[in-house]
Amino acid sequence: MNLTSWMGERMGPVLRRLLDVEAEAARLRAQVAEMKRPGVESERQEVRESYYALIGQAREDRDYEGAFNVECDLREREEQWAAEDRATPAP
C-alpha cells in the first residue's frame, strides 16, 4: 500500500469531521447573534429617538432643510441596519 492510497482511506472521516465542525460553528454564530438581538434593537431604538428629537428641533427652529438632511441620514442608517440584518445568519 502506498502513501496516496493510505491517505485517501483516511480523508473521508477527516473531511466529514471538518464539515461537522463548520456546521456547528455556523450554528453557534447564529445562536450568539440571536442572543445579542435584544441589545442591538435597544441601541437602534435609542439612535432612532435621537434622530427624531433632532428632526423635531430642526422643524421647531424652522430649519426644514436641516430636518430633511437628518431624515435622509436616518433613512441611510435604517438601510445599513437592514443590510447588517440580512448578513447575519439565521438560527
Image (cartoon, rainbow, N blue to C red):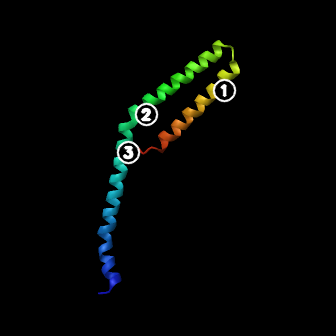
Q: Quadrant of residue 78?
A: top right
Count residues near mark 2 (Cα–Cα under 10 Å), then give few for <14, some for 14-19, many for 20+: few
SS of the residue under disc 1:
helix
Could you tell me if the residues under marks 3 and 2 are in contact, i.e. CB atoms within 8 Å?
no
Compared to 7, does 62 lie above or below? above
What residue type is disc 1 on?
Answer: Asn
Label 3 and label 1: CA atoms lie apart by 35 Å
What residue type is disc 3 on?
Answer: Ala
Q: Is residue 54 left or right of residue 46?
A: right
**Label located before the other in sequence (3 or 2):** 3
Compared to 60, does 85 lie above or below? below
Task: Say which mark, if any, is on residue 69.
Answer: 1
**Residue at the image point whose x is 45% and y is 43% from the top:** 88
* Callout in the foreground (3, 2): 2
Task: Say which mark, if any, is on residue 40.
Answer: 2
Pick whichever, 65 or 11, lies toward us. 65
Q: Quadrant of the C terminus?
A: top left
What residue type is disc 2 on?
Answer: Val
Q: At which x and y percent is residue 3?
A: 33, 83
**Label located before the other in sequence (3 or 1):** 3
What residue does disc 3 label? 30
Pick whichever, 74 or 85, lies toward us. 74
